[in-house]
Image (cartoon, helix red, strand yellow):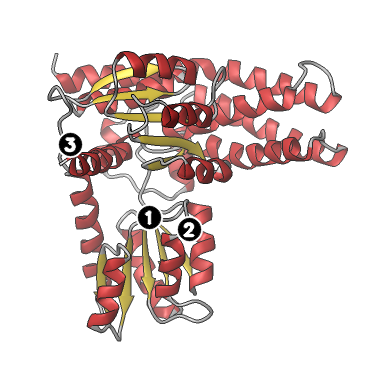
Amino acid sequence: MSDAEESNQKLEALNKAFLEKMPGHLEEIQKLWGDLGKGSGEDNPAEALRMMVHKLLGSAGTFGFKEISDLLEPFEAFLNLLMSEERGPTEAEILQHDELITSFRVLVEKAVAGKLVETAEESEGQARTNSDESSDDEEDVTVRVRKKRILVADDAILLRKRLVLAMKSSGFDVFEADHGRAAIAMAKKKDPDLILMDVMMPQMDGMEALQAMRKDAILNQIPVFMMTGQNTMEDVKKAMEMGVQDFISKPYQPDDVVKRINEFFRKRNRVVPTSGFDGVNRILVVDDSDLLRKRICICLEEDGHMLLEAGNGHEALEKAHEFVPDLVLMDVMMPVMNGLDTLRRMRMDPLLSKVPVIMLTSKNTIDDVRAASHLGISDYISKPFDPDSVLPRVHKCLARTKSRKN
């Protein structure tokens, strides 16, 4: 059996295990939600429910069930609100979220029956080729690769729409904004993989928006292409100093822009990993979701890294002291010891204080990202994520660490 076949078998087994656990997750969430509404059950059903929803939100999207993660995202935000206000749900909120739980049950039933991935593809209008159709097994539920998300910010509506059409035709998920402030708000909401931004826009121009993004803990890692019809060498130099990946001059052909975007993503995925102290990078993956953690490990193992695993912060610190890792990927919300407390202890430990850390977070834990940034994280990845998209971020972090040592 080849390495690729063995990896595929592992992925299929993980996907099957995830599906088998889904009905149990549904039952637990229904019970905790009922306890929260009645004010009974556990001492703190809101916290237990938030942990359960947070874990499932990240896992579902990563395993290809985007509809489930999209449904649970506002539910997690609502639970965060209840906890911050230290109250239970109102009658109106109970009725509203009872409907959400019902929709969740329907999606779980579809997922277990092997129909949810197909439904998601139809809802997104994805066209399949004849060869794809002949190779698909109707009962096979596979891990879908998320389409790249791109934000286009330009106040010229017709020009923007023409570019968006070309990008959507090439398989990208595309979002739009007509000025800098709208672009920043949209970027925080949609977490794009790339932003194309015009320089000359009303309210806030592209350079001002870029400057604001580079100071923002949430947005400063998003790559940006600048677009302008009046670019000067001063504009180009200023934009490049702020980390712009490319500069597109107007007028342009949309197909040419798409080619540059595709080439950019290809180059990102071809970054060669650096070597650790013993020739192999030791990476510690910390997450209380066994399936999600193993899914990440399979991806990193195929890339030639040595993997260590931990299910909570306490275990992570023990593993880190035994085998000092070259990099740590760590979830924020975990039992026993959460990611932030673990990171604080690492930064106070002479042995671990310089170990780079990539945090795995939910979109609803922005405050946690800011807190982690103050503790010196190297990067953060929002759940749910495409496991394959983790590799370029890991490569970049390891390369940056190696350059500092040299």
Is label 3 in a helix, a strand or a loop? Answer: loop
Q: Nearer the viewer, residue 167 or 322?
A: 322
Q: Which residue is mark 1?
A: 222
Task: Check if mark 1's residue and mark 2's residue have beta carbons within 8 Å.
Answer: yes
Can I make out residue 63 in this image? no
Estimate how packed mark 3 is, as few (under 14), some (14 to 19) or many (20 or more) residues with alpha carbons within 10 Å: some
Q: Is residue 370 left or right of residue 74?
A: left
Q: Which residue is mark 2?
A: 187
Q: Nearer the viewer, residue 229 or 211?
A: 211
- The amino acid beneath tag 1 is Ile
Is label 1 in a helix, a strand or a loop? Answer: loop
Residue 102 disc label: none
Earlier-in-chain disc, 1 versus 3? 1
- What distance separates the C-alpha of mark 2 from that of mark 3? 28 Å
- What distance separates the C-alpha of mark 1 from that of mark 2? 9 Å
- The amino acid beneath tag 3 is Pro
Comparing labels 2 and 3, the label whose residue is closer to the camera: 3
Q: Nearer the viewer, residue 262 or 348?
A: 348
Q: Is residue 358 above or below residue 184?
A: above
Q: Residue at x 35, y 48 (%)?
A: 127
Q: Is residue 49 left or right of residue 224?
A: right
Earlier-in-chain disc, 2 versus 3? 2
Q: Could you tell me residue 129's position as x and y percent?
A: 27, 45
Q: Is residue 212 left or right of residue 308?
A: right
Estimate how packed mark 2 is, as few (under 14), some (14 to 19) or many (20 or more) residues with alpha carbons within 10 Å: many
Q: Which residue is mark 3?
A: 273
Earlier-in-chain disc, 1 versus 2? 2
Q: Could you tell me residue 116's position as x and y percent?
A: 49, 32
Can I make out residue 156 in this image? yes
Q: Quadrant of residue 93?
A: top right
